[in-house]
Image: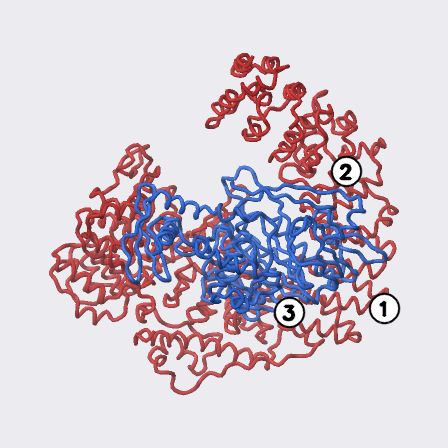
Chain colours: A blue, B red
Amino acid sequence: MTSIEHAYRYSYPSAVTPAEGQAGRVELATSGGEQASPLYFEGQLVYPRETADFLRALIDVVHARYHVPAAMLQRILIMADPVVTCTEGRLRFEGFSSCCGVYARLDVLENGLRGTTFGRGTTNVDFNPPMLAALARVRESDALGLSVGRDHVAASTTRDTVIERRVPLPARWVRGFGEVQACLARMTQRCEIPGVEARRFLRALPKASMHRRATWITAAGAGLRVSQLETPQGVRVGGVERLRVLTPVIHHAELLRVYSDDTTGASAWEIVATGMRYLVAFSPEVWRGFSGEGQLLREMAASDRDALLSRVRAALTWEWLLDVDVLAAEVGAPVSQVRSALAVLSSRGLVGYDLAERGFFHRVLPFDLGQVERLQPRLRAARRLVAEGAVRVEENADSHLVGVVVSDAVEHRVRLSADSFSCTCPWYAKHRQARGECKHVLAVRLTLEAADV
Amino acid sequence: MSELLLDAAERGDASAVVAALTGMPEAARRGAAPRVLSAIREASRGYGMPNGALQLAALGVCTLSELEHLPRHARARGAEAIVVLRDRRPEWLPRWVETLMEDEFYWTWFPLVRTLVRDGLCPRPDHPHYPLGMITGLRALRSAAPNPPIQDVLRQDPDLLPEIWHLFELEGGGENSLANYDRFSFGSTWSEAFLALMRDGTLPRERLLDATIAALGRDFNHYRAKWFIDFHDKLAPTPGELTARAAHYLELLHRSTPNVVAFALKTVEKLDRAQPLDDHALLAGLRSRMRSEVASQVRSVIKWISRVAKRNPAVTAECMTIVSEAVLHEHKEVQHDALAWIQQQKGTLTPAHRALLERARGMVAASNTELLASLIGTASAPVPTPIPTGTPARHVSPWSRLAGLDLLDTPGVELESLGPAPFDGTDVPRLHASETVVPAEDLAALIERCASAIENAGDVLEYELALDSIARLADQRPPDFAKRLSPLTKRSAKRLAARGAVPFSGQDHTLDLCAVIHAWATQQVLDPIRMTEYERDFLRSPLQADGPGVPVEWRRSVAGYVARRALAVARQVSTGTALPLLSTPTHASGLIDPHALAVRTQVWVAAQATPDPHDVTLAMLRVAPDDRAKALQNFPNGPAEWVLSLRYALGGDHAIGESVQLWTAAAFARAPFATDEVLCTHHPALGADAGVPARYAPQVTSWESHGHTHHRLRVDVAPAPSLRVDVLPAAFFAEPSADRYFTESCLGPRSDGAYRLAASVSPVVADALAAESACILGANLDWWEAQWANKVLLEPWANPDLPLRDMPRLLLVLGLAAKDPGEHGLASDVAIRAIEDGRLVGDELGATMSLLLPTGLVKPARWARSLKDVARHSAWHTLTVRVAIERVCGASVGVPPRELLELLLELCTECGCAASGAAVRKSLARAGTKGKVGATATALLALQQRDATHATHQAQARSAAYEGRRARAERWGQMREGLS
């Protein structure tokens, strides 16, 4: 398995430390970002119990592995820590499951925090087992502080043990973490139900594993129900048992919003609570991670986007929410192109997508994402085909273009039109356009670009 | 020196390897490494494993990187490995130890690692698997005596004693945990070892107790947490020890592991009874239990909270807040207990409490609504949509009768006795313009369609269209034909070469498509070869001379029938003849527009060719009832028997010919519910659905085996079915195999695709399919075998134009009782739709349930679960389910099942009516007054009609019933006028 080695280096272990009286403090150790161990925030949690519960739920997602491929003899349980982005007095905690199929984000909003922001940026945060156990003991009545990072002067005077961990992050995991943002950007809201109904719905979920079944969640009265019949209004969920990750925190929900992406069949579930929002996105199937969706391959393959990407990237300044119109004016490009550029940047871990506020936000995942595109298997295979001279254009009409790609002694015919593509390969036959373009289509596009057709 | 080493390694002489490695310079080791690695690779081929000497040689000569890349079974362990490492003393030894600790079976390396640490060859690894590895790995250190107790091993290696505290901090998992070891190991256990070491003073009791309680607070999995609960009990803490740790036990109430919480509740209750705890701390702990899924736990906590409020009235408000949360619990008993207690404290109800209770409006069980209303008042009921009066809309009017709308207007007919929409599926429009499919028109579209059909076996429409494309475009052979077809031929060749693949045998329809492509590309038809082995007849592929075959009986199944049509297509395209398939659906519903059939027939007549009878009969069964008379006017009137039989199927008057296959299918397609006297005279005694409509009689047989009662559903068909395999409707009744070993069903293999293909064979009337489906589903209701495809059998019945007669209803009722969430979920979906569109009414649903209930085949609790889901949908669904359960109760000989009675109580309360009917009340009276059944029956008997609620509910139900039926009538009207 291709992997990227990532090193975590925490100056001290994260902990919930007791303070004078009854108040305590959640001290989150940081690693990476603009500094080695940056300090981003110090303050108080307005809703300590809720925040603690949501953080634990997020870690549950990070530690979860809903699918282990049959061929995998050794379970590679990567313990990739969550990342936190601090911007304008608000915090976003993000985590991604080991199986690359579930993404979770906790947005602690302005009314959920009181404190001082020392900087803007994204960093890894340490969530060790003792700290998680301490978080479980937090009560409503506790006064609880929160610090993301530690003052360097204070840190240098303490005698904490430095924690170092080198983790081989599978390339598909890093890719998936990025691609899930592009998937979120395509989603539309399908329903919104009260928290009480959401709790009832989750409790009524089938106990048995349903990962082999395609399941649709449909509206029923004021709530939701699980259906086995596809309906236009239904939200398809593969592996509906994965929704149980919401159960430990659903009692905090004021609202539950459900979103879905019609192209891939992925869905996102957002709990709106006082002072925070908790979003969990699920891949279309249990065995299908976000990394394999390939919806951005076309954009990645395009060579003319580099200049625009650089301009857009330079214009990002850790905004909580990006105004695409303003950004477009700033970089002097059409809004549609800027949106497309943001989608590509999301796959590189440079922006995320906020469904509730329907916009991108700036954050830089603290991983080495330079290799992500290089490690994209389909793109790599397409470039190899082009290099081997296996691609030729057979027909170039106004409405469409037909290319022929010789691969494994077979001629695959690729048909491209303004808004569609097709190929005669088995991969396209199986997935159609739901998982992006196959290597043959990409090879034709690369050839056309090279020839400036 | 390296020669010596290699010789010894190949001989398997471990001692000689150790001797050769001793003192060997590093350069010589590196020189030997390639050959050692090569020998290991050779020995590891297939299921091979390098011998111990070779493993030692590798440990002695390889670099860390080389060792890390070795398979785990090629890594040396044991005493010789220590000797080799002690001699070599590589600087990478700590990293090698880290690698071993990362192994999936890390505990197997514990003896080696422990010895290295003890001997000072490497530092203690800072890895959680080191102490955890001790759990299972410690036994391998017991070399002094056979199977010594764990405590003795620990005493012999006292440096390990500090490590044991980590076992209270780390959970372990899989095979390696304290819980697993103590459960499955023989002889000494860890709990005994800890107790023994505690008794002799090696381990302090106080710390053991604290560590155990702390471990319970770590949210370990319930299985592994159980070990700590048991160990806590074995420590038998004194009352003083318990009291001193009261705060810790209270903390455990916040945990998420159910058995830990149950343990904590028990302990805290004991402490609280002995000496009342701090009320605020106690209530904070109990509050977290209000969200427990275990109803009994929440109910006992409510009782406890009431005791706290009684002893300290100052905390009553806090108690009310906590108990208010329980009102939202999904169990009605919990809701009732919470509401009843709050009602007792009604005087202290604050606006904040009211707001909390307000959230529960509409959420509590119907039987608790009055109680809730007594606390917060009644909400105004939604006003039902009034039923329109006067002349129905233009599209609705002609179909009012068949949609069952007229029944709603019939004077004196109550909703409870409303009949289903009286259509039979042949008397209503079935072709919807939006469902028209587009056939492939050129080679490019054909290739795309075929590729898609091969890769998506569950999409049978794609398969049909792919087959049709090849049949129609078989003469298209451009100069680059072979190249253009190469993706398909390569894929097909791969599928056909798979071991055991036998095309045209009924094994897999996508395999048949591959063979058709093969025939088109190579002019070679892969007609299966018949052979006999072990006194059984098999079919095998001509491409696999020594490959395994499939039983010849598979061809007798419905899938086999369709496969024989594919074989005919293969023969046709192998000659390059381009003629359309008659039986290709023109609509996504699987139906054929009779006008399209006329056009296709004309092409065949013009070509003076004769289509395959399998294709003709399949076309007859698929032809839609729409506009047949008009289509007949444009139909060729040729002399050929197949043309005449097609005309007969559409309603034409022709003399019955000699082909039983053609005329039987034609008679069925013409009038499936009538006896065809002419056919019966000409071809007598053909059996069910061959001139005489089938009559079904379900039977459940039961037998005892190994203390269990087994049930099996069989559906007898009358008249006795014809066993002729080439008669299409009869294929649904064929016994596919004498012993039913090779195939369980006459539909074909157990797969989504095969079942969907079977359902596509007769889309107009599918009762025979439903009967067989019921048998298949009924044989696996308890999910004793993972038959994922069974759910597909319920899919056709979501179609609103297929009426739910006896057999489909039997299938549906079985589906509602299935254990698998997919099956009972889909059955609920179908029931919801069918009630909505008027195909299913309570009386008929109840009658079918009554048929099955006494047989023991179904579990009533599962019915109650599914029907509860159905009843939630609308007032009309509630009423329908209520009527069904009343019918079951009325027909019940003994005491009706408790789960159904409880649901009936909820539904009657919601409808505002009493349990009606003398038979129902008599059956309720039989339940007595004792136990849960008696209490529920008594409550049902005591129910009085609440006129206002009843009237509102009836109006809502009538409105919902009307709307569903009107929508159906309107849809039919639009379909007929081609408006949609």
In the image, farthest residue toward the bottom: B390
Q: CA distance from mark 3 to mark 2?
A: 48 Å
Q: Amino acid at mark 3?
A: Val
- Secondary element at image label 2: helix
Q: Amino acid at mark 2?
A: Trp
Q: How many marks?
A: 3
User: Marks 3 and 2: which is nearer the front?
Assistant: 2
Q: CA distance from mark 2 to mark 1?
A: 43 Å
Q: Which residue is mark 2?
A: B165
* Marks 2/1 same chain: yes
Vertical side of B213 occupied by B14: above or below: above
Picture coordinates of residue B757 (x, y %)? 34, 54
Q: Which residue is mark 1?
A: B314
Compare marks 2 and 1 and give the one earlier in the sequence: 2
Q: Residue at x 72, y 74 (%)?
A: B354
- Secondary element at image label 3: loop
Q: CA distance from mark 3 to mark 1?
A: 29 Å
- Disc number for residue B561: none
Query: Does residue B478 appear in the picture of this structure?
Result: yes
Picture coordinates of residue B866 (x, y %)? 53, 61
